[in-house]
Amino acid sequence: MTAALRRLDPPSLNQRLRAAPAMTRPLMLDIIDHACRRFPSRGRSERSARITRLVDAEAWTDAALALIELELPLWQVRRIAYDEGEWHCALSRERELPDWLDAAVEARHADLALALLSAFIEVQALAVEVSRPSVPTVRPAPDPLYQPVACENFS
């Protein structure tokens, strides 16, 4: 198991987010500790200080949006909708594409901040699952004895 997988345990975080009736300070701090890679390494940068102030003020939705902006710079909020007592949130890398072409990550919850953070955790889990090699793959060189043969009969 890689260090990133040990640090981010998406199933338990997702279960805790789904089971939580509302956002709490300990839950937000736990998400920051376990799912955020850029937040602790930035030290006391402007963005992390802003997120800390938002958490202290219990502005959960703004803190969730700031975390998404900090941790997932290539992702954007595609859609936030309220339907039948639940918030539906979608994060996407290609926001300008039509819905049917986009591969957005969606989550829902009765609390807006928890819906945003559930989508955030899903994207973080996808990022961990997609392992990219550090060296790009290259096709092997063709066999030097390889010669194409034409098999056409023109008679």
Image (cartoon, helix red, strand yellow):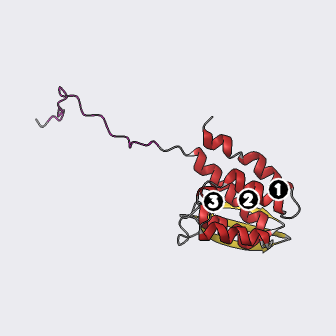
Q: Nearer the viewer, residue 27 or 104?
A: 27
Which quadrant of the structure image shows residue 144? Answer: top left
Pointers 1 and 2 in contact (CB under 8 A)?
yes
Going 80% across and 56% down the picture, which residue do you hit? 17
Q: Main secondary structure of the magenta part?
A: loop
| Label 2 sits on residue | 118
Going 86% across and 64% down the picture, which residue do you hit? 22
Going 10% across and 35% down the picture, which residue do you hit? 155
| Label 3 sits on residue | 39
SS class of the residue under badge 3? helix
Q: Nearer the viewer, residue 33 or 44?
A: 44
Query: How many C-alpha atoms fall within 10 Å of the one at disc 2: few (<14), some, or many (≥20)?
Result: many
Q: Nearer the viewer, residue 51 or 95?
A: 51
Give left or right: position of 127 versus 135: right
Range shown magenta: 133-153
Task: Give the mark nearer the N terminus: 2 vs 3.
Answer: 3
Residue 42 in percent (x, y) is at 58, 60
Confirm whether the magenta stretch covers residue 17: no
